[in-house]
Image (cartoon, rainbow, N blue to C red):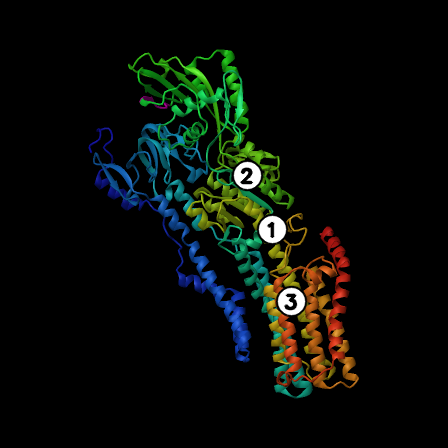
Amino acid sequence: MTVPPRHPGLSTAAAAERLASDGPNALQSAGRRSMLRIALDVFREPMLVLLLAGGIAYLLLGDLTEALILLAFATFSIVVTVVQETRTEHVLDALRDLSAPRALVIRDGVRVRIAGRDVVRDDLLVLEQGDRIAADAMLVEAADLQADESLLTGESLPVDKVAGSEQDTGAARRPGGDDQPYVYSGSLVTRGSGIARVLATGPRSEIGKIGQSLATLETEAPRLRRETTRIVTWCGIGGGAVALLVVLLYGLLRGGWIDAALAGIAIGMSMLPEEFPVVLTVFLAMGAWRIGAVGVLTRRAAAIETLGSATVLCTDKTGTLTENRMSLTELWLPSGETFALQPDLAVGAAYHDLLATAALASAAEPTDPMELALHSARAANATTASLPTGALVHAYALRPDLLAMSNVWADGDALTIAAKGAPEAIARLCHLSAAELAAMTAAVEAMAVRGIRVLAVARATPKDRDWAATQSDYAYALTGLVGLADPIRASVPEAVAECRRAGIRVVMITGDYAATARSIARQAGIAEGDVLTGDDLAALDDAALAERLKSVTVFARIMPEQKLRIVEAFKAAGEIVAMTGDGVNDAPSLKAAHIGVAMGKRGTDVAREAAAIVLIEDDFGSIVQSVRLGRRIYDNLRKAMAFIFAVHVPIAGLALLPLFAGLPILFGPIHIALLEMVIDPVCALVFEAERDEDTIMRRPPRDPAEALFSLPMIVWSVFQGGLAFAMLGTVFLVEHRSGMGEFELRALIFFALIAEIVALILVNRSFGASLRDALTRHNAALRYVAGAIVAVTGLILFLPSAQALLKFGSIGWRDMALAIGLGLLLLVLLEACKPFVRSVTARLAARA
């Protein structure tokens, strides 16, 4: 099809030269890692190396069961990490798909359809309703054109576009806002048509800039992983040093180097901290499974625990706090009457003409969200209005100088014009008096303050079918005002309130206007505070922004790169930042935040790939459940880690005591391995299944600088283990001096150690539970583990072959009662110490 000479477009040769010099209209895939590279990077993780080394060590020692358990955990960790990291590499692919749709362009005066990647600068794009725009461009022609730019701005309403001029070429471009001559790559034409000259392609477009920022952002390594790696490394070094010292001392003092090697192996096994990485892997994997049950997909398991420590939640407005759809919320009549629409309240007959006129002033088959809402409201309320429903015979489109549109309807010979548009435009068409204009303006302002978008509606009656040149040539009468809004999600106010009770500061970041943002924030229950606009933000340096962050709760008219700057500023202030979003514009800040939370249904592929967790049902309330679960995981991790520290003290002590007391070695590698068969499932299963603490959502987030292995926790754990060792060591020395045989004494101390391990489990199940709760608090995993301990103990007691393998002698019921009594005494003593420990910890925290 030939077009007018004023729009000949580029020549084919010129387009080829531009394509060669500027490159294709697509995002580059620089830095993409292969699956092999990802796997090699995984093997560099210290925790994974420790798991593999521990498994191989047990394999060399002949303990196949323990070796297979550790190697299975290592394999699981490798597979999960490789799969998750491979999926994150898809984020730029998703951006490339969005940024390079097919395009209709004018080349050599002819309209041709080409691949989006072949669009070049200065190409002329032909835009029609439903087209995905292939590049950033300036309109040279526009006929009632509207574009949905929500991918870039996050706002649900399409924006009106107007034709530009050569003087506009160098002006600053910003997605969002009505009456701009610019259109953007990835946006969708929702109405009208136009021709646009391409200004930027590929990485130079707005969506391309987002892609470049994503490519340069690195996901921060979880703090928990760093801490665990550090403590595991130090414990491994310390355990190895002690084991080597034992071998040297034993060999030099006693002369039996084979026995010295066995003693060293036993000590090394008793101090080998292989439970730490196992516990972390299992807790996070189980956390991902548990959180999936409440509608949250975990893409990076460590983010669940991090979310539990979040101090700031930066939330988008559209599609996150709101439903991302327009709904009719309020009606106003020139008489001054108003009506707020409610689900269970029918619209009065006085408002039926207003509803009908507003629907007739819209497209017959609407795609615009506001027009869809108007049609829906009319259909839901049976109208008695005598307005025509016949044929649409003529229409007047929006113009830059008159932001109103009119449809002429014919019902037989009866003609009616229905008009809607900006209140000031409709007021001009109706020639309102000063008093009428003042009344309408007051109603508009009252709705605007509440975040409602207002359209005025009017109607007129043409004399005949000799249509006037413009809408201004008809005598319109004001029918009223219709107020539309993107309704807030029902679950949001309670979810925000829960966050506030948990000490999490909720901050809104939106591209919408300040008045609308403030209104939505008030409805959501976000704390009152300052509103900072994008223009004001741009004028602040980093120091000034850091100061303003203390009081701002709403950021309005924010651009994508500014969202990223806000997140980075919060992180620089020491906050743990969670960021929610659903659009392409949110992807950089989702990736940069400690925890990126994407919407699953309405969210784009780019947002989901950049985020750490995804809300499958777009339910903001799921964030609160995720926070609760994250805090529970951290609490239970601390309990498990405290137990690991505590339980290794008596084991290591009993392995060392005979050496320094000049007595026969009490435990060998097989005994330590058997004890580990009790300790490992306890750490990985029992503590993971512990329920929430009662105060879990009534306490502030922990200090981001607080270490998982804090000094008070380590001291309390060592005290627990030290007390257990003191009791066992005393019994060991007393019974030895009283003449108990070596094998019988080994059996007694082993069973007493098992009882004390069970006591340590019960003590560490809760930070503050009573003795009764320690024994009766529900935990199905604990019941299974306790049953297994009883069964194994019974087998050892009644199977002579098991006793021979372990070098145990037969002991009487009095000795078994003594062993169980030691465990009960330890439980009572430690539970009695808890109030004192809590008060000391609280005083230390207050001083810090």
At label 3, the amino acid type is: Ile
The mark found on residue 644 in the picture is: 3
Q: Is residue 407 left or right of residue 722?
A: left
Q: CA distance from mark 2 to mark 3?
A: 44 Å
Q: Is residue 363 above or below residue 506?
A: above
- Secondary element type, mark 3: helix
Magenta stretch contains residue 760: no
In which quadrant is the N terminus drawn?
A: top left
At label 1, the amino acid type is: Arg
The mark found on residue 628 in the picture is: 1
The percent coordinates of residue 353 (x first, y second) are 44, 20
The percent coordinates of residue 229 (x first, y second) are 57, 63
Q: Nearer the viewer, mark 2 or mark 3?
A: 2
Q: Is residue 471 above or below residue 679?
A: above
Q: CA distance from mark 1 to mark 3?
A: 24 Å
Q: Nearer the viewer, mark 2 or mark 1?
A: 2
At horizontal 63% and vertical 63% (from top left) the residue drawn is 640
At horizontal 30% and vertical 39% (from top left) the residue drawn is 121
At label 2, the amino acid type is: Ala
Q: Is residue 733 left or right of residue 269?
A: right
The percent coordinates of residue 22 (x first, y second) are 31, 44
Q: Nearer the viewer, residue 246 or 642?
A: 642
Image quadrant of residue 161?
top left
Instruction: Give the extent of the magenta segment.
Output: 393-399
Which is nearer the N-term, disc 2 or disc 1?
2
The mark found on residue 490 in the picture is: 2
At horizontal 46% and vertical 21% (from top left) the residue drawn is 423
| Camera sees residue 244 | no
- Secondary element type, mark 2: loop
At horizontal 62% and vertical 35% (from top left) the residue drawn is 528
- Secondary element type, mark 1: helix
